[in-house]
Amino acid sequence: MSRAAPTHLVLIPSYNTGPRVLATVEDARRFWEPVWVVVDGSSDCSGEALLRMAAGDHGLRVLIRERNGGKGAAVLDGLREARARGFTHVLTMDADGQHSAGAIPEFMALSQARPDAMILGVPVFGADAPHLRVAGRRVSNWWANLETLWQGIGDSLFGFRVYPIAPLLAVMERTRWMRRFDFDPEAAVKLCWHGVPAINRPAPVKYFRPDEGGVSHFRYVRDNALLTFMHARLMGEFLIRVPLLMARRLRSSRR
């Protein structure tokens, strides 16, 4: 039986994930209500299938974007609508089934106990995880921790997270970035800069083969170039913020 809360919702951005998104939504609905899906300009008819599913499920809502704008853009649309509806927190998860819906109640409970914090999933990889993806994320994690003076980002790229809506919207609406694959690491770094504490919790991750319906839009050269540019931008801002971040660390160590 799914749990419900008037303040917390599950938000799933989706782009051309085919039938896999339907299974992901079904799993999420088993554990939480409400669940929202933002269809980001998909051309695979998954939007129509989701709308049919939502017609028979009062706990599911589907938002359709006419054009593909990227993960961050889809999340931003969901955040704005969630704020307008009175929600205070969203749990984001990928539409491709890699994230375990069974972890939703634990993450939501942690967020309800610490509404000031972001709850960051730290991936627990199985044997099916591509080695290149597992090893490559260490670089982004190192930079994200440097940019926050090691304030506690367990994994900068993992998208299974609970965010407080107000500070995340404040960060996103002040920049034209954070609209694509750069959303997750930049969100974690900038929320740390704005004093949002990070609570890390392990979460299983599964990679599906193409014959299992697995879909990946990750492009090694393109997306790593985007991450490199993002960290270059963040380092420029970080250098300006170093005195403030050092003072915050000093205050924290004295408590």
Image (spheres, rainbow, N blue to C red):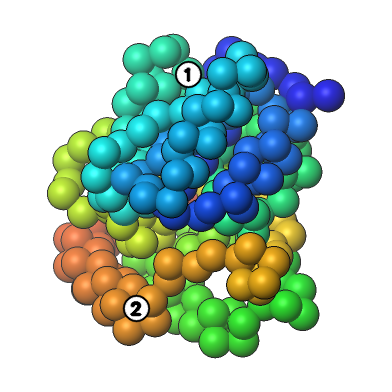
- Residue 50 vertical placement versus 101 (above, below): above
Furthest toward the right, the residue is: 1
* Sequence-first disc among 2 and 1: 1
Report the residue marked by disc 2.
224
> At 49% from the left edge and 83% from the top edge, which residue is drawn?
136
Task: Out of 216 and 221, give the one closest to the viewer.
Answer: 216
Callout 1 environment at 10 Å: few (<14), some (14 to 19), or many (20+)?
some
Query: Which secondary structure, mark 2?
Result: helix
**Amino acid bearing label 1:** Phe
**Amino acid bearing label 2:** Asn
Callout 2 environment at 10 Å: few (<14), some (14 to 19), or many (20+)?
some
State the quadrant of the N terminus.
top right
- Residue 86 vertical placement versus 164 (above, below): above
Residue 222, given in percent of the width and then of the height, sits at: 29, 77
Residue 64, given in percent of the width and then of the height, sits at: 36, 33
Residue 45 seen from this side: yes
Total labels drawn:
2
Which quadrant holds residue 8?
top right
> At 24% from the left edge and 45% from the top edge, which residue is drawn?
67
Report the residue marked by disc 1.
87
- Separation of marks 2 and 1 at Cα, in angstroms: 33 Å
